[in-house]
Image: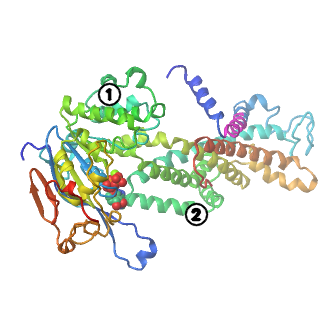
Amino acid sequence: MAGDLLVVEDLRVYFPLYRSLLERLLGRPYKIVRAVDGVSFTLGRREVLAVVGESGSGKTTLGKAILGLVKPVSGRILFDGVDLARAKGGEARRVRRRISAVFQDPYKSLDPLMPVGEQVAEPLLIHRMAGRSEARRMAMEMLEKVGLTPASEFYWRRPHQLSGGQRQRVAIARALITQPDLIVADEPVSMIDVSLRASILELLESARRELGVSVILITHDIATARVIADTVAVMYLGRIVEYGPIDAVVEDPRHPYTAALVTSTPSISRRRPPRFPVKGEIGDPANPPPGCRFHPRCPLALEECRRVEPPSASDSGRTYWCLNPLGPGGLWRGVEA
Amino acid sequence: MEGGLFSRLMGVVAGLVRGPGGLMTATGLAIITMFALVAIAAPWIAPYPPDVRPPGAGLLEPPSLRHPFGTNDLGYDVFSRIVWGARVVLKVVLLSSLMSMAVGVPLGLISGYYGGPLDRLLSMVMDSLYAFPGIIMAIAVASVLGPSTFNAAVALMVVYVPTYYRMTRARVLELKNEPFIEALQAMGAPGWVILVRHILPNAAPTILVVFGLASADAILTEAGLSFFGLVAVYPQPDWGLDLYYGKNYLLDGAWWLVFFPGASILLLALGFALLGEGLSERFRVRGGSYG
Ligand SMILES: Nc1ncnc2c1ncn2[C@@H]1O[C@H](COP(=O)(O)OP(=O)(O)OP(=O)(O)O)[C@@H](O)[C@H]1O
Ligand SMILES: [Mg+2]
């Protein structure tokens, strides 16, 4: 679609697996980890997309590829029509500053030695969007906006003088100060006290409301995601297995993996579907199973799931990649393990 | 942010001598400061000129009130020679340490951060320099350049650049994977901003520790160079040189000719070593080899 902010097309990010000297001498083949292996999606303006999936499914790697921190081996990332891999020089910088990041660990994502206000001001200086004193003034304002008041006092504090929640507010202030169009937030609340999570997510939500930013919210907690996300992409072993409006996907999933994810998340509602049973652990991304990657764990797997990579299918707004999907309301019927 | 440079410096020092390793740091700083003051105030502290026989002084006089460290075979006052000699060793070692730092730290930063072929080449060169016994390499370089304090400093620099390089590079490799560096990369910060504004300050404790420990080692190596006459020329006052000439009179019982220069060398080296060890405990810098 023309108006989309971000278009990701068949993105693949592979990492070479470390081989010991002995393995090299023995001529063991070069192994690769297919961290992201053919991901496509689009993100509209003001849209919040949640990317969910178990540990190791490639969520962080996908986010890093969009942030330019890792290089894809193939595929395209179009940001506002600009191919990120091809953009050079000034254009690359202009695009970069429209994409911000918020990372998981607020204890580690800030420079321990620099006053936090200076760190909020830094992107403005790096992108020459303001002079020193102007940047300082804007950083104060931004600290104020994310609730760190009085800003003139917080400005000079070092990260270790702040709580985890306050640090994450600093990180969000730093992400917002360049007035980006997209924020990639990688598990922004998973290391934060449960009681503060909602208020941190609220900051992202109000950024969307007031500044019109789009957000990619990476999380393995689908319940958290539901608070602010419009759409969800469920990842498994480097692939998206189901994608669509988050309420529809969570309440009435088609893919068995989504069903497993949804029913394993503790929920506060009393009406809870039965746990959808899956076997074992997430597979090895260096050695993904043939056919559907989820088939070894899937209670609904058919014979052909072992051989055939499932094509995409659509059903009332969602897209899924499964040969034997759950029907509407299937979540509530349960499965015999 | 407020206060003069001096009071800020004192604040930093006060912070260092408190907490873990503080006693070592304080002792080390005290020893170094004492020698530094002696070196600076040599003309006022030394009772006699270092290379003239004072009127009435005997040859090989044992320590006495007039000559607290005795006199040597030419009747020169050993105490005055030690005092003036402090200038030589401090000049050579501080100059060489600063030069080693000025070369080793930036190379370590660039090499560690950017990696690639340049990193491999530099690592190879530095590792082969490092594998060479320090004193032998220093003697070789100093012999080629000829005896002078500056040449000695250059010879020592060749020995200690790899130490600064390796330790800085190792620290950069650690820091490079820290999420806060990744956050800077994600916001499009250029490499030099990341290196100068973020990695260097975070690597500074490591560099300071290396400064202490490598300087301690450099003092011993410098003494070796002086011993072989590669720093100063007799009768210039120089601890290592005095050790060399003094050893000839050991059998005559003139112990003070080697004891005082030797003890000075060891004490000064100890001062820097204590500083380095104290700082490394303070900053929890992990171990390594600094020679
Ligand atoms: N730099 C790297 N080098 C090698 N392998 C990597 C690298 N980064 C990630 N991987 C591998 O890629 C796969 C996907 O990792 P990724 O961190 O993207 O998963 P994730 O979904 O974010 O997991 P988590 O929920 O634990 O954060 C994992 O198997 C991981 O081991
Ligand atoms: Mg992750």
Q: Please tell me which residue is depicted at 26% across the width and 45% down the height of the picture.
A: A271
| Residue ID for mark 1 | A146
Segment colored magenta: B21-33
Name which residue type carries label 1: Val
**As drawn, is B196 to the left or to the right of A285?**
right
Secondary element under disc 1, as helix, strand or loop, is loop
Relative image position of residue A98 (x, y in whole percent): 21, 38
Classed neighbour count for the residue bearing mark 1: other residues with Cα under 10 Å, few (<14), some (14–19), many (≥20): many
**As drawn, is B169 to the left or to the right of A286?**
right
Classed neighbour count for the residue bearing mark 2: other residues with Cα under 10 Å, few (<14), some (14–19), many (≥20): few
In the image, residue B137 sits, relative to residue A175, either above or below, namely below
Cβ of mark 1 under 8 Å from ligand 2: the answer is no
Name which residue type carries label 2: Ala
Q: Chain of mark 1?
A: A
Secondary element under disc 2, as helix, strand or loop, is helix
Q: Nearer the viewer, residue B119 or A321?
A: A321
Relative image position of residue B18 (x, y in whole percent): 65, 33
Say whether residue A83 is magenta. Answer: no
| Residue ID for mark 2 | B131
